Amino acid sequence: MAQCLAGMAWAGKIFVFIDGIKVPMAHKQRFDGSALSLISQQFLGLGEAFIWRWEREARARILGADALKRQSLISTFPALLVHLAQILTPSPLLAANGIETIASAHGAERARTTQFGPDQIAQEYQILSETISVVADGHIALIRRDWAIIDRSINLAMRQALRAFAFTQEDLRRKLAASISHDMRTPLAVVINGAQLAQRSVDAELTKRLAGKIASDADRLKEMLAELLDALTFTHGAKLALELSTFDIADLVKEICVEYQQMNATCVRTCSEAVQGTWCRKSMRRALENLVNNAVKYGDGGAVEIVAARRDERLLLSVHNAGAPIPPEQQGRIFEYFTRDVAAAASIGWGLGLPFVKRVAESHGGAVMVDSSAANGTTFLLEIPVDCRPYVQATTG
């Protein structure tokens, strides 16, 4: 078996390598072998064997583990093994309490990026305990005190990981629910506006068209309510489920422009070419509505322009307004949940739309960017593949 452990100093910090993964040591003494006891050094020397066996057992026994890439599955376990090795040395310096931080990172990561549940996380730590027992047998002379330290540390790590998992999952649930509730305002506004126009109309044909539009957006609200219930009860990571279909983005852009004209909002116009592609129409619509809502809200009453174009195999979809620019230091934060320009504190909403736009772009295999200046106004750009099927797992064909 290849040598898995090396020590090095880098910018005042000490690292070890376990199975090719660089892990920081918890103390800042020079790594020359003198800081750790013989037992600790022997434990670190088995790092690759621990990881190799743990990964094999985890993929075989944990539901969903075999679908994860190696780096994602191994996660924080190399760092945990380094911590266990260090606390086997009877020294207050080496017994730094880093296990809770390591385990918290592991639990939060599992909630955000996998479909693991509490049972799978508990299994991970149980398999780790078994792995250490099997691999160490005959290689390290662990005494009763050593096993007590290892068992106590693994149990502490498991409890902390489960707490972090539950906290992160609840946080994701709240954000998803808040985002969907936020987006329900657009179809609700169409319904209210259409009903008001229908009440004043004496034109039977116009009233019929308005009734059709009200029914259509009422159906959208019904779908969003179902999504809201799903968000309140979800147990998986914050992955966006996509229902893929093939359509022309120009048709969707035109529909949205017509809606805003009916609501007597700021002039929303388009200069879009026909681009046929395979995307999730429902999520693309919500993303575009969020961008237009922001452009109208912060556009100082000026026109909002939507442009769709194809460049090679990518769709470029932009929304532009000429309002006050977004400060450069805030442009990187506006795609995170619950961040918003302080100057706009009196406005409705808490920055829930833009994080959803980011999720839509990334779920389609693309990205969202912003360019904002006093001279050129503000432009949000969605860049996604024309055919996103290679990048996503659709819920329907």
Image (cartoon, rainbow, N blue to C red):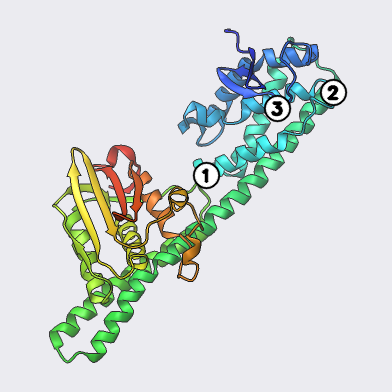
Dot 1 falls on a residue whose secondary structure is: helix
Residue 69 visible? yes
N-terminal of the two: label 2 or label 3? 2
Query: Is 295 situated left or right of 267 in this image?
Result: right
> In front of the other: label 2 or label 1?
2
Amino acid under label 3?
Ser
Q: Earlier in the sequence, mark 2 or mark 1?
A: 2
Residue 138: quadrant of the picture: top right
Q: How far across and down, in percent of the image, does residue 225 sit?
A: 42, 67
Q: Amino acid at mark 2?
A: Ser
Q: Which residue is mark 1?
A: 112
Report which residue position mark 2 lands on.
91
Quadrant, the N terminus: top right
The residue positioned 56% from the left and 28% from the top of the image is 74
Instruction: For marks 2 and 3, give the one nearer the viewer.
Output: 2
The answer to whether residue 233 shows anywhere in this view is no
Instruction: Give the spatial CA distance, label 2 vs label 1.
Output: 36 Å
Query: Which amino acid type is shown beneath numbered disc 1?
Result: Arg
